[in-house]
Image (spheres, helix red, strand yellow):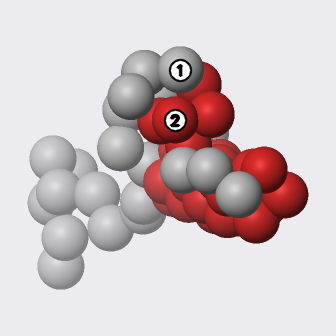
Amino acid sequence: MVSPSQSTITPNLPEPKFGFNGYAERLNGRAAMIGFVATIAIEYLTGQGLLSWLGLL
């Protein structure tokens, strides 16, 4: 028998809006993929590396 202080029910809490959670990690991964593809496109279209294109080298 389970005592009243030991509940076997898991609360259904909303996922946090900040911190390390599944949504934040998916969003970060998608942003990284878009940035990587954009960098490759810039290098292909301009014939320069990203840092040269930005004027940093």
Q: Picture coordinates of residue 6 (x, y %)? A: 17, 57
Q: Which mark is residue 18?
A: none
Q: Picture coordinates of residue 17 (x, y %)? A: 56, 27
Task: Please report the residue visible at 39 percent of the width from the left and 28 percent of the height from the top.
Answer: 57
Q: Is residue 34 visible?
A: no
Q: Is residue 57 visible?
A: yes
* Mark 2 closeness class: few <14, some 14–19, many ≥20 residues within 10 Å: few
Between 41 and 24, which is closer to the camera in this rendering? 41
Quarter of the image for the N terminus: give it.
bottom left
Q: Picture coordinates of residue 27 (x, y %)? A: 64, 49
Task: Please report the residue visible at 56 percent of the width from the left and 43 percent of the height from the top.
Answer: 50
Q: Secondary structure at mark 2?
A: helix
Task: Please report the residue visible at 22 percent of the width from the left and 51 percent of the height from the top.
Answer: 4
Q: Alpha carbon of mark 2 to alpha carbon of mark 1: how far?
A: 5 Å
Whether the residues at callouts 2 and 1 have beta carbons within 8 Å, the answer is: yes
Between 7 and 43, which is closer to the camera in this rendering? 43
* Mark 1 closeness class: few <14, some 14–19, many ≥20 residues within 10 Å: few
Between 54 and 38, which is closer to the camera in this rendering? 54
Q: Which residue in the protein does label 2 denote?
A: 52
Position of residue 54 relative to residue 1, above or below, is above
**Location of residue 20 (image quadrant):** top left
Q: Secondary structure at mark 1?
A: loop
Q: Which residue in the protein does label 1 denote?
A: 55
Task: Please report the residue visible at 44 percent of the width from the left and 49 percent of the height from the top.
Answer: 21
Between 51 and 5, which is closer to the camera in this rendering? 51
**Location of residue 41 (image quadrant):** bottom right
Position of residue 28 relative to residue 43, above or below, is above
